[in-house]
Image: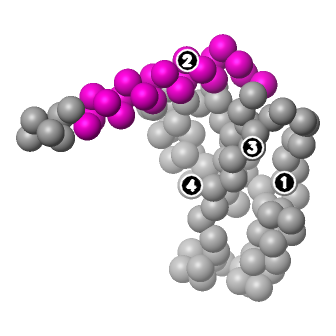
């Protein structure tokens, strides 16, 4: 239990340091979050808000085929993906994979 508490405190302190870094250099890091399902976007926004991170993430609700990433030199962009494995899709899975492929390229 003592080791776990130390790990948790360590992780919390590192996260606070990184948040401070992002506040001091807002144009250095770019986070975009997207989901085609409105309910997932609501959950994402609520979670980001609870973690104090909503100001750092641009949240959208659209097809990833239509997304664009700022490629300004010196700006890092992180892309995290929950691929369309076919479990929660209501449309053609091939079309969903094509949209993801288009965005990642």
User: Could you tell me residue 63's position as x and y percent?
Assistant: 79, 62
Earlier-in-chain disc, 1 versus 3: 1
Labels 2, 4: front one: 2
Which element type, helix, strand or loop, lies under badge 4? helix
Res. 77 mark: 3
Place of residue 31 in the rendered image (x, y in percent of width and height, measured from the top left) = 69, 40
Along the polypeptide, which appears first: circle 2 or circle 4? Answer: 2
Mark 1 or 3, which is nearer the eye?
3
Where residue 40 is drawn, which disc sits there? 4
- Contact flag, marks 4 and 1 (Cβ < 8 Å): no
Relative horizontal placement of residue 5, taking residue 59 as reference (left or right): left
Q: Mark 4, mark 1: which one is toward the viewer?
A: 1
Element on which disc 3 rests = strand
Is 29 left or right of 15, judged from the image as shown?
right
Could you tell me which quadrant the N terminus lies in?
Answer: top left
The answer to whether marks 2 and 4 mark residues whose Cβ atoms lie closer than 8 Å is: no
Q: Position of residue 32 (x, y in %)?
A: 71, 44
Residue 37 against residue 90 in the figure, above or below: above
Label 1 residue SS = loop
Q: Residue at x 69, y 53 (%)?
A: 79
| Local crowd size for mark 2, using a 10 Å CA cut-off: few (<14), some (14–19), many (≥20) | few
Q: Earlier in the sequence, mark 4 or mark 3?
A: 4
Work out how far the residue at label 1 is from the one at label 3, CA to CA, in angstroms: 13 Å
How dense is the environment of label 3, judged by Cα within 10 Å: few (below 14), some, or many (20 and up)?
Answer: some
Question: Which image quarter: residue 51?
Answer: top left
Quadrant of residue 11 in the image? top left
Magenta stretch, main secondary structure, is helix
For label 2, the SS is helix
Task: Tell me the tag on residue 67.
Answer: 1
Q: Magenta stretch: give its range.
A: 7-27
Q: Is residue 23 visible in this depiction of the protein? A: yes
């Amino acid at each position: 239990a003592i080791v776990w508490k130390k790990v948790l405190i360590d992780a919390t302190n590192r996260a606070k340091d990184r948040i401070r870094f992002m506040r001091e250099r807002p144009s250095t890091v770019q986070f975009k979050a997207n989901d085609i399902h409105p309910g997932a976007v609501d959950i994402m926004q609520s979670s980001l808000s609870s973690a104090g991170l909503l100001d750092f993430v641009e949240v959208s609700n659209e097809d990833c085929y239509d997304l664009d990433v700022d490629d300004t030199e010196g700006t890092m962009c992180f892309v995290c993906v929950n691929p369309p494995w076919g479990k929660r899709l209501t449309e053609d899975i091939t079309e969903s994979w094509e949209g993801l492929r288009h965005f990642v390229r």
